[in-house]
Image (cartoon, helix red, strand yellow):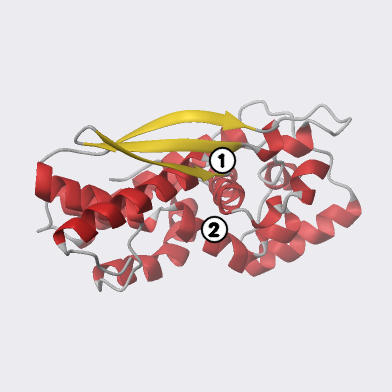
Amino acid sequence: MRMPSRVLEVPSLRTPTVDAERRKELSQFQKQAGLRFRRFDLLDLAFCHRSFVNETFEEIDNNERLEFLGDSVLGIVVADFLFRLLPDRPEGDLAKIKSHVVSEDTLAEIALSLGLDSIVHVGKGEELSGGRTKKALLSDSMEALIGAWYLDAGYDKAAKFILRYLKGPIDTVLANRHRKDYKTLLQEIVQKRFHSYPKYILEKKTGPDHQRTFWINVVVQGNSYGPGKGGNKKAAEQEAAKMAYEALALQVGEKGRA
């Protein structure tokens, strides 16, 4: 699939003011990441977490719209690459590979390798709770960066950037050397035994916005496992899936390494 390579007109965004010191930090980041933004304010907006925006006096947006855009760009780039790379694979296989490659764990690892943890803007509460190293925050910031780069440079350059860092994880998945997540393991065993799918139910969430805790149960064949808890829904679902998987795998002697 060919997408327009021209740079799209950037919609109106309330971007942060970039002073000389911050420009220097962003320039260093760009060198490490292999990027060259025309607009430093757009790049800086990709690193403005909601907790920071809630505390700053400057009227700016947070990075969530860029995250939404970057997630979609990431998805189409990886889907297109896999579609062309693996012409004989069925849709189910392609979807499974894609889900591993664009996972929170993978994106967080890339974000750390690029130093996003040291450059992202977070609020005081998020800082104190270790927000800079949270997988969800890092992966979201990575998607926001992709969204910003897509707006600044166009689809072709965005795709080149994405594949530069994701071809390695794709090769790892294809060689079956990746670490399966518990949601995937649980789904596989439930499909095999019951020809159905697990159902995740949010029981409650506690804590302030910058330090939420989610409590989630997973239901398999009428049996509830959990609750798993985590700082976001994905983490809580993983914890619940782990409980269910270990219980079910133990019953049938299928327990494997995750």
Provide residue 60's location: percent of width, then percent of height.
77, 30
Cα distance, mark 2 to mark 1?
22 Å
The correct choice, above or below, for 170 with respect to 215 in the image is: below
- Disc 2 marks a residue whose amino acid type is Ala
Q: Residues within 10 Å of mark 2 (few under 14, many from 20)?
A: many
Residue drawn at x 36%, y 57% is: 181
- Give x and y (percent) for residue 120: 72, 51
Front residue of this view, candidates 28 and 227: 227
The answer to whether any part of residue 191 appears in the image is yes
Quadrant (top left/top right/bottom left/bottom right) for the C terminus? bottom left
Dividing the picture into quadrants, the one containing residue 159 is: bottom left
- Residue sitting at x 42%, y 53%: 103
Left or right: where 238 falls relative to 69: left
Depth check: 200 or 144 in front? 200
Secondary structure state at the residue bearing disc 1: helix
What is the number of the mark on residue 108?
A: 2
Report if residue 5 is visible in the image: no
Residue at mark 1: 151
Give the quadrant of the N terminus.
top left
Name which residue lies at 13% across and 57% down: 87
